[in-house]
Image (tube, grey):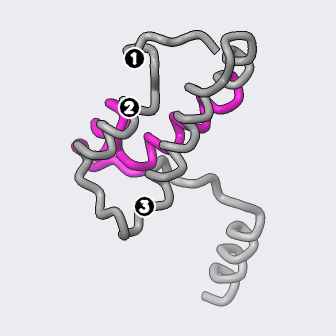
Amino acid sequence: MPVRDASELLYPAVCETIAVLKLDPDGADAAAAKLAQRYARLIDEASYAKQAGVLRWLGPELLKVLESLGATPAARAALKSGKDKPPAQETQLDRLRNARTRKQA
């Protein structure tokens, strides 16, 4: 396997990002942090021939984990603005419960 320039590696960048977030290594975010590190390592370890495919599958997954940790600009902006996830769509079960509540009232 050819040697890659360190600036192309994701694993060190992910580790640095997690360190900056100051997550408790044994806390609630520990599993997500480990998952992000594992995804980054798998992407980095892929051969050049396979890296495009690995990035296609694991890149979006890595991004989702980083977003859940508040490690992306969009996630931090949402945290600062106080916005959480958009409200969930009302499910059929919710509509039935609401109809029953209105009927009982």
Q: Where is residue 93 in the image (x, y as percent from the top left)?
A: 75, 70
User: Is 73 placed left or right of 103 in the picture?
Assistant: left
Seen at 33% across and 47% down, the residue is 83
Of 6 and 15, nearer the camera is: 6
First in sequence, mark 3 or 1: give its number: 1
Magenta span main SS: helix
Residue type at the position of mark 3: Ala
Q: In this view, does 9 lie above or below 22?
A: above
Badge 2 amino acid: Pro
Q: Distance between the residues labelled 3 and 1?
A: 25 Å
Residue 90: quarter of image = bottom right
Residue at the spot 52% in from the left edge and 12% down from the top edge: 3
- 38 over 46 or under it: above or below: below
Image quadrant where residue 9 sits: top left
Circle 3 sits on which residue? 30
Q: Do the residues labelled 1 and 2 touch (CB within 8 Å)?
A: yes
Q: Give the range drawn in magenta.
A: 56-84
Element marked by disc 2: helix
Choose between 38 and 92: the one closer to the eye.
38
